[in-house]
Amino acid sequence: MIQRQHTIWLLVASVSLIELGIAGCSQKVEKNAKATQATQTSPQPQTEEQKIKCQLDAPYLPTPQNVVEEILKLANVNKGDILYDLGSGDGRVVIAAAQKFGTRGVGVELDPQRIQEANENAQKAGVTNRVRFLQQNLFQTDISKATVVTLYLLPEVNLKLRPKLLSQLKPGTRIVSHEFDMGGWKPQRVVKVLGPKRGENFLYRDESCYTMLVPDEQREHTLYFWVVPKYIPNSLR
């Protein structure tokens, strides 16, 4: 009887050990699976280019040349103006204004690659005596000397920038924004411009900050025009 009870106890103990072993293996497999999943979902280290892009307030999307001309026309740019292009990219707006009207211009851009391109383009166009480019955050730039300001940013950036425009710019300063308005500050004019017959840059945000898609279609561009008023309504402050 004692021997039978001993045998039963050994069988129970063996089963318990086996169950513990299975549980231990399951926990180990689960831990390994979680570790593998964490490895797979962990973000990859950003390159220097991605780090710069993530600091930008808006991605670089080159404006077609015919739209640049309409921007300058809408702003009634002339030789006596000082044009500030906020988020100036490769410098095409201020360079075009300097070439066509002799306008003095300042491009403000955070991306050093775009600044280098802009300076090279200004040199090729022979307008380095009329334009300059600042590698700065546009929110930290003094724009008080501008008589014309051009923008191609994003809706939320325009809204964030609006108080600066209204507080720093002199009454009568003209502003043109490509594609996006400024919320409650209603534009005085809205102009539609058909882009060239080629792929245009559309964009969406993702984990790498910005990704550009290039569909094969013609696109209509919208330009918004304002003049800084002498008296700023409380609703816009």
Image (tube, rainbow, N blue to C red):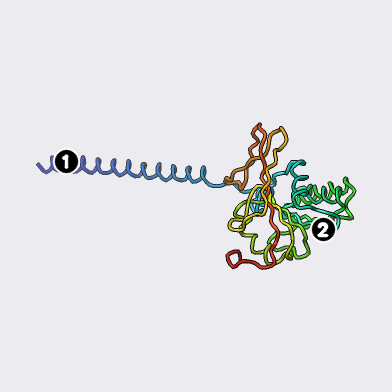
Q: Is residue 176 above or below residue 213?
A: below
Q: For numbered disc 2, what is the local secondary structure?
A: loop
Split into 4 quadrants, where in the image is the N terminus? top left
In-front residue for pair 111/80: 80
Residue closest to the far left: 1
Mark with earlier residue (2, 1): 1
Callout count: 2
* Quadrant hosting residue 9: top left
Find residue 68 and report its horizontal and vertical position in percent: 76, 45
Does residue 8 appear to the left or right of 183 in the view shown?
Answer: left
The dot on residue 81 is 2
Does residue 69 appear to the left or right of 7 in the view shown?
Answer: right
Q: How crowded is mark 1: few (under 14 residues within 10 Å), some or many (20 or more)?
A: few
* Quadrant hosting residue 24: top left
Mark 2 is on which residue type?
A: Asp
The residue pinned by badge 1 equals 8
Split into 4 quadrants, where in the image is the C terminus? bottom right
Find residue 193 and report its horizontal and vertical position in percent: 70, 41
Q: In this view, does 111 lie above or below 11?
A: below
User: Is residue 20 visible in the rendered structure shown here?
Assistant: yes
Q: For numbered disc 1, what is the local secondary structure?
A: helix
**Cα gap from disc 2 to disc 1, whole angstroms:** 100 Å
Q: In this view, does 3 lie above or below 163?
A: above
Does residue 184 appear to the left or right of 194 in the view shown?
Answer: left
Find residue 33 and report its horizontal and vertical position in percent: 44, 42
In-front residue for pair 79/164: 79
In-front residue for pair 174/23: 174
Q: Is residue 188 above or below residue 26?
A: below
